[in-house]
Amino acid sequence: MKRIPEKELMNEPEQARAYAEADFEQPHAMFIGLFQETFPTVAASVRVLDLGCGPGDITFRFARAWPQCHVHGVDGSDAMLLLAEKALGREPSLKGRVHFLKGMLPELELPCPQYDIIFSNSLLHHLPDPAVLWESVVSCAAPGATVFVMDLRRPETRSTARQMVELYAAGEPEVLRMDFYNSLLAAFTIEEIQAQLIGAGLSGFAVCSVSDRHVVISGRMPG
């Protein structure tokens, strides 16, 4: 099945709210667990960049898991960032360590010139040109920085995509079910991601399937 791109931003309030209220406990907990397995040691006072942070759930989970880190979450959606800021208001222990910023790849204006850890969840499939993610990683990463990206993996058929919607989003609002279906069709295959990494000079990164619908890309920058 050929890729069918979807909208880059989830900027409608109803759409953003449905995403923020959805049950992502299993994949988001998996994200943190896999990061811990892949990179068991995280140094103190680390600068962390979350690209495509959405309403901030993984941003918060990461900051809680590694309290020595300062995390900047970036998203292009005003609706998502509004929800992220509201959620941050309910997390007083994270104030001063977590900050949210509006930005679009690849033109990012960030507080830090380079970051020690860059991670991203479910951003890659939203991008019309996937190269901008890897270009941004190269531009924002400090020498030796840790990079960890998790995203959807495109199924072979639309029928399989519909089955996944029924399996994993049966009780969710219709707007979220449609977004999930469109995201599956917009996702990349492992082979396509490997080609993207070669083009970005990141061929040393590992690309691994971690579920029937998720892929993880991980590695360390040179230097």
Image: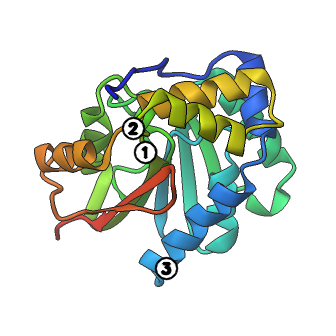
* Residue 76 visible in rendering: no
Circle 3/circle 1 CB separation < 8 Å: no
How dense is the environment of label 2, judged by Cα within 10 Å: few (below 14), some, or many (20 and up)?
A: few
How dense is the environment of label 3, judged by Cα within 10 Å: few (below 14), some, or many (20 and up)?
A: few
Q: Tell me where residue 5 sits by quadrant.
A: top left
Mark 2 → mark 3, Cα distance in angstroms = 29 Å
Task: Work out which quarter of the rendered image holds the N terminus and state it.
Answer: top left
Of the residues under marks 2 and 3, which one precedes in the sequence? Answer: 3
Q: What residue type is labelled 1?
A: Arg
Q: Position of residue 133 (x, y in %)?
A: 33, 39
Does 8 appear above or below 162? above
Does 103 appear above or below 13? below
Query: SS of the residue at dot 1?
Result: loop
Residue identifier under label 3? 37
Mark 1 → mark 2, Cα distance in angstroms = 10 Å
How dense is the environment of label 1, judged by Cα within 10 Å: few (below 14), some, or many (20 and up)?
A: many
Q: Where is residue 106 in the image (x, y as percent from the top left)?
A: 32, 31
Q: What residue type is labelled 3?
A: Glu
Q: Which residue lies furthest to the front in this view?
A: 159
Q: Residue furthest bottom?
A: 41
